[in-house]
Image: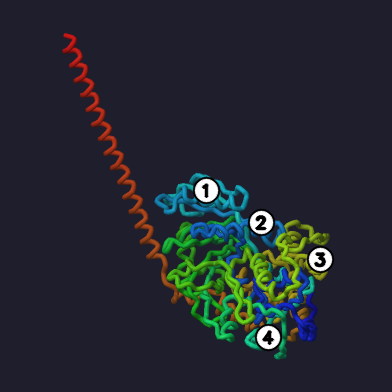
Amino acid sequence: MWSNNWREETWSRLDQAWDLIIIGGGITGAGILREATRLGLRGLLLEQRDFAWGTSSRSSKLVHGGLRYLKEGKIGLTRASVHERQRLLDDGPGLIDPLGFLLATYRGDNPGRWMYQAALTVYDLLALQWSHQRYDAGDFQKLAPNISQEGLKGGFRYGDAQTDDARLVLRVIREAVAAGGTALNYATVETLLRNHRQVYGVQVRDGVSGAVAALSARVVVNATGAWADRLRGQLGAAPRIRPLRGSHLIFSAQRLPLSQAVSFLHPFDRRPVFIFPWEGVTLVGTTDVDHDEALDVEPAITAAEVAYLMAAADAQFPSLRLTLADVVATYAGVRPVIGSGQADPSKESRDHVVWEEEGLLTVTGGKLTTFRLIALDVLRAVRHRLPTLPAVDDQQPVLNQVDVELAAVGAEPLRRRLLGRYGADAVALVAAAQPGELEPLPGTLTTWAELRWAARAEGVVHLDDLLLRRARVGLLLPEGGAALLPAVAAICQAELGWDDARWQAEKAAYRALWRRCYSIPAAATIPDWRPRLDALRVQRQQKIAMRQQRRRLTAVLVSLVLSMTGVGLLWGLRRKAEARSHHAG
């Protein structure tokens, strides 16, 4: 638990000899801090904004092997991912949960049924399980009642998983801190400190108080993701990162009801996209485009991306007649990938990379699912700098086992949720709850007690930290939950120690941020996706009709050939019979 004066206490302890300073408070940095504390290292994590502010709160929320990576021949990445997926499912129920995926097959699809069957077989074999099953069209429609039925031949169901990405980061950090690690948000590393062209520390500024400190460490790790080139630039290193933006639309479950995920190829460019249930809403994503905006400006979905994702939802669920008015919220994140010059951003590798330059160890790339493996690779890479480092044990659990009782929580789903998201802190969270606060906020699965606990004990500095990352209210409710802000203030304002003026300023900043980065752009700026979609439907129907016509013509020709062959055969038999009769006569 972080107390109200935890920042001051932490800053008072910063001037010490650190084994490891980790720059970046996303899932990669969190994982490195956690694994470092297991090995007894004195680790410090510094994040320039809030924990999970960047990519790690804006992912697709999936813990998966990456079925599409098989197509690219990434067998090793897929195998590692499905094994880590299972470890996370085992260690974090309630935070990482199974999610069924539906994969429809349509007449004329390429790839078709047999290619999908082969891919899913390999996918399951790599995971040492058998989760996929094929359904005919009738049974498949029962699994996804509103799915497009035109040309539907059936489909497959297979298993993956999902998570609350920001809560995963927080739990990993909290477990690292409980094991002796130190973590600070709103702590900007301004300068790398060097001696004889070797990085030995950092100069850090507190974004809250303005305090500045020079810190030294045996190893400095650059785990800043899309920002990695900024620190590398201080060493004169050439840029390597290609920032790619992935954006999502969020619909209410009432307008886009799904009990499991639907995976399909986008009708425009045949990229894989997903539509799936999450936290009581439905997500549609993702795009994959170059992000040319300044990285310090919070990313937002563009009008073109809205049209692209609306086209995907409209194509797969035409009977629902979804419109822009049905979009509850949006979000966009920037992925760090190593640029290789590919014209298509989606063809860039998602593998993680670790390298050292003048004493600065940089790690970037990779997947949310494999954060533990990335952390272990980093610790192996620094062994030559830490000769007494114990051997890395890759059989340790990803998350701590939680063996506590929540007697005050009667409902098993809520008990599971709280234990998964908060781990050992769930006991204190429930104890802090006031009467009625274990009830959910209207329209969400989030309880009022979670807001109180986050405000009290989870390092909240700004209101968007609370509503967009500690709880995901800003993504789940219209207008970012504006209608509930008075009730939020009644619970959280005192816990945060904010006076009325501070609350009003934070509320205004949050509302402006939500409108700018989490709503859709002005409707007039969004291209109409429907004409192109209608044209593609017509082309598809024409192709199907032509294919059917060719099949019918082929059938006629085959019948004609068979008939002619039969006539010829009968004529030959008759001639032979006549010849035998003549010979006998």
Q: Is residue 39 left or right of residue 371?
A: right
Q: Nearer the viewer, residue 438 or 29?
A: 29
Query: Which residue is located at x 19 percent, y 10 percent?
Result: 584
Q: Residues within 10 Å of mark 3 (few under 14, many from 20)?
A: some
Q: Residues within 10 Å of mark 1 (few under 14, many from 20)?
A: many
Q: Amino acid at mark 4?
A: Val
**Res. 296 image quadrant:** bottom right
Foreground disc of the pair 2, 3: 2
Query: Which residue is located at x 76 percent, y 84 percent?
Result: 14
What numbered label is drawn on residue 202?
Answer: 4
Q: Secondary structure at mark 1?
A: helix
Is residue 27 visible to the viewer in this orientation of the structure? no
What numbered label is drawn on residue 427?
Answer: 3
Query: Which residue is located at x 65 percent, y 82 percent?
Result: 48
Q: Amino acid at mark 3?
A: Val
**For the C terminus, which image quadrant?**
top left
What numbered label is drawn on residue 140?
Answer: 1
Q: CA distance from mark 1 to mark 2?
A: 26 Å
Q: Secondary structure at mark 2?
A: helix
Residue 47 to residue 158: above or below: below
Foreground disc of the pair 4, 3: 4
Q: Secondary structure at mark 4?
A: strand
